Image: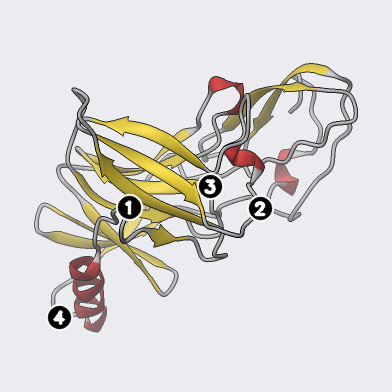
Amino acid sequence: YIDDKLVTPGTALGAFTSLQIPVPAGSHDIVVMKDKYYPWAKTVEVDGGEILTFSPFHLTIATNGVVLPKNDPEYKTAKDALAAMKVPTSEAPLTSADGVVEIFIRKTDTELGAELVARVKDGQEIPQSFCNESCKNEKVVTALSAEVRGIAFLPGHNDVILLAVQDGVFAIEVDNRGNHQNFQILYRGIRPIFALSGGVTYVEDNDSVFIVYSGPSTQ
């Protein structure tokens, strides 16, 4: 939807890799929706002749998953992946699959104590997700007041970050144009950790290991 007007039928969501929609200059509300998935929304200001690019993402509202018993051969694969999950630092950041963006946790002297930072790698063009009032090659995605147990890029994106903190695993986008960042829940439990391996999302929480299915990540 753009300004509450249907642009494409909901059943077509995910059937395209990109969609170009001309709009007049001014402020516009964009909402991308699909049944049983979190909506993605932005309010943006468009200048005449300007081309803005967005990468909506969608996780399922209801968490779907399978518990891995300890005698399942995949249980060891999951435990190994979970044990290998490290929280990246400025000196050892995590790089996106396309090699454009790197992310890390930086400690601060503020009351909150830390921040999640995204940075464009040297030699790469700054993506629009790093532009709000101006374009910068580094931005603070969010401030953090709780222990971070793991971060990763949402598969298929260099602008959406999975974050294990407090009682869940959450997805937050780098893009804050319109002074709004979309935030979705992958899993909520007690004190989970997670890992991505071979296209599979593993979560461990309360002595159980799961494969979590989040649904397609629409771009």
Looking at the rendered structure, the secondary structure element under dot 3 is loop
The three-letter code of the residue at mark 1 reads Ser
The N terminus sits in image quarter: top right
Q: Rate crowding at label 4 as few (under 14), some (14 to 19) or many (20 or more) other CA atoms within 10 Å.
A: few
Label 2 vs label 4, nearer the camera: 2
Label 4 vs label 3, nearer the camera: 3
Q: Which residue is mark 4?
A: 71
Q: Which residue is mark 1?
A: 90
Q: What residue is shown at x 87% (from left), y 26% (from top)?
A: 23
**Which residue is at the front of the view, 166 or 133?**
133
Q: Is residue 178 above or below residue 217?
A: above
The three-letter code of the residue at mark 4 reads Asn
Dot 2 or dot 4: first in sequence order is 4
Label 1 vs label 4, nearer the camera: 1
Q: Mark on residue 159?
A: 3
Q: Mark on residue 125?
A: 2
Dot 4 or dot 3: first in sequence order is 4
